[in-house]
Amino acid sequence: MTAAPTQTQSETMDTGKARQARITGAVLIALSILVLFVFGMDSSGDATFRLSRPTDPWALPNLVVPAGPFNYVAGALLAFLGVRQFLQGGGRWTALSLGVGLAILVMAFLVWATAGKAFSLTGMLQATMVRAVPIALGGLAGVLCERVAVVNIAIEGMLLAGAFTGALIGSLLGGWGGLVAAVIVGGAFGFILAALVVTYRMDQIIAGVVINLFVLGLTSYVSSQVFSEYRFLNNAPVFRAYKIPLLGDLPVIGPMLFKQNLFVYGALILVALSTYYLFFTRSGLRARAVGEHPHAADTLGINVYRTRYLHVTLGGMVAGFGGAWFTLGSVGRFDENMTGGRGFIGLAAMIFGRWHPVGALAAALVFGFADSLQQKLALLRTPIPSDFLAMSPYIATIIVVAGFIGKAQPPAANGKPYVKE
């Protein structure tokens, strides 16, 4: 049984919560000043957000927002949330207040950037979903591995291997052949990682880096030496978008969720299946037990080694599927290092999502939103460089990892090799 906290420990916890609430309040008040005196005073005209396209069967009128009044109200709400945090001195609403405040800040920024102009909100949300796919699948691969206490730094390499295999085999056997091959190759690298860290107890970070460097070097060599001469090996078909009847015609959410290609639907299905498996099945409970306390799981008859092998291999297969998105779901060809660090962003999304499949998907949508917003800002010609927005998801991740809105706790045995007694 867990011992109850002592009075000193309780006082320390209360002091920490009060300090966290005060910091959150200060941040919200600072954001309110930014919105009031930068966005509010510099906003003129109306911001027009197009919610429908000319081809949509159920058209919605444009959302027209008076920029100045909206941002003044947004600034007042932020100030209210900040003052409330100071007065309450801690509590369970601190993280929620910060989340609501950041959402208000994003809306105020969008209205300010679009003042006197117009852009398609539906198109941006659709692009957000597409750009979040490889990050969500990378984060899901990390969840499957780290829930059994194996740190998977090799997600970047597995994504790159999936992209390369998808382009090569897809060029020879078609899209479905390339997709199956990408999943198999991703699973093979997952199995290799499991062998290195489970059987041979190699340092998990070093093993992941080795796989990343090996895949990067191999694919770069083949891309520059082989694909440049035999171009027919790098010309794979692309899975086109498929609209789900009726659901795809829904305004706003229809194009975002139900008018996408195979990889978007696959990512959503995999997140749902993984959540059910990890938290609502006996096998999922055993996997989480291996990640929390492998010695106790072993005494109950759970094969720790086999469980880790299985889940790391499955994580590699998910990453291979995510890597195929870059070639079979996007451009149809492989370019050197085309994943661009999405595997590492997937790790950040996993931490942001607190080692939960749905949380990893939500975090991936934040990254995808920032990525798609950059392009919109370039079209709107705002005075803020669009690349500046690329920093925001990383800053949010640092805040989460640092424990600013509640400490993110990994599985207790994460990264620790297991030796059967």
Image (cartoon, rainbow, N blue to C red):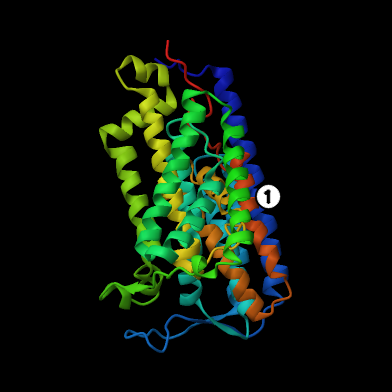
- Where is residue 371? Give x, y as percent: 58, 65
Given the current orientation, which residue lies at the most extreme front position?
229
Quarter of the image that includes the N terminus: top left
Say which quarter of the image contains residue 274: top left
> Front-most of 372 and 168?
168
Left-right relation of 260 to 117: left
Vertical relation: 14 (above or below) 31: above
Quarter of the image that includes the C terminus: top left
Residue at 59% x, 18% y is 8
Vertical relation: 214 (above or below) 324: above
Vertical relation: 11 (above or below) 346: above
* Whether residue 406 is visible: yes
Question: Circle 1: is it few (<14), some (14-19), or many (20+) Cα within 10 Å?
Answer: some
Vertical relation: 182 (above or below) 379: above
Left-right relation of 82 to 357: right
Report the number of numbered marks: 1
Secondary structure at badge 1 equals helix
Please name the residue that numbered disc 1 is placed on. 26
Say which quarter of the image contains residue 227: bottom right
Residue at 42% x, 43% y is 187
Given the current orientation, which residue lies at the most extreme top position?
421
> Front-most of 88 and 225?
225
Residue at 47% x, 30% y is 195
- Where is residue 139? Give x, y as percent: 48, 48
* Amino acid type shown at disc 1: Ala
